[in-house]
Image: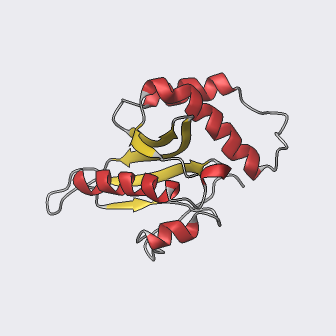
Amino acid sequence: MTTVCTVRPARPDDARRLAELRWIFKEEDHEGQAPASARSLEEAERWIRDRLGGGHWLAWVAETGDGICGHVFLCLVERLPEPYADNLPIGYVTNFFVTPPRRNRGTGSALLEALLLHARGAGFESLIVWPSDRSGPLYRRSGFQPSEELLELPLDT
């Protein structure tokens, strides 16, 4: 039996569950082996709560009757005004996660579609993302493509 999933904008009171899912997401990346310097869940909860509703960070959640089972975040990157062109914002898409039981069932597509609908309606110029190997195909199916203009300088050397 397929459980219906609803997508809605995240609220500050979702912060605890979003922090929990963030930890599950990152534990998958570390194959369950948390480094000794792991941050507390409460720190993540405060960070998320402080930013949701502030305008620069938005998020969407997917939920079933059992609660939130996925999320995607969007960070507004404002651009300086200029005299000869629009200075439309750019969006940074991040923290896209769906719990394993909900994967490959349309949940991720529904989350990404809600984010794209908002970004188009809000007049964003473009969206950027650093996809994982797993999420890359979904982003490409949704119209994301490699950029020849974006450069990156890793500073953790």
Place of residue 73 in the rendered image (x, y in percent of width and height, measured from the top left) = 47, 45
> Residue 48 placed where, x, y %?
51, 30
Q: Determine which quarter of the picture holds residue 110.
A: bottom left
**x and y percent of residue 97 in the render?**
58, 49
Q: Quadrant of the C terminus?
A: bottom right
Q: Nearer the viewer, residue 126 or 121?
A: 121
Which residue is farthest left?
Answer: 83
Name, please, the residue furthest toward the front: 1
Number of marks: 0
- Residue shown at 45% from the left, 52% from the top: 111
Q: Residue at x 18, y 59 (%)?
A: 86
Q: Is residue 83 left or right of residue 115?
A: left
The front one of 104 and 58 is 104
Above or below, comparing residue 61 to residue 156 in the picture? above
Quarter of the image holding residue 135? bottom right
The answer to whether residue 64 is above or below residue 127 is above
- On screen, residue 145 versus residue 118, left or right, reads right
Q: Is residue 42 above or below residue 147?
A: above
Picture residue at 46% right of the left edge, 72% below the top: 141
Q: Residue drawn 55% across and 59% down? A: 105
**Coordinates of residue 78 in the picture (x, y in percent):** 32, 47
Residue situated in front as seen by the camera: 36 or 100: 100
Rendered position, 49 above or below 120: above
Please, which colouring scheme is shown? secondary structure
Q: Nearer the viewer, residue 79 or 11?
A: 11
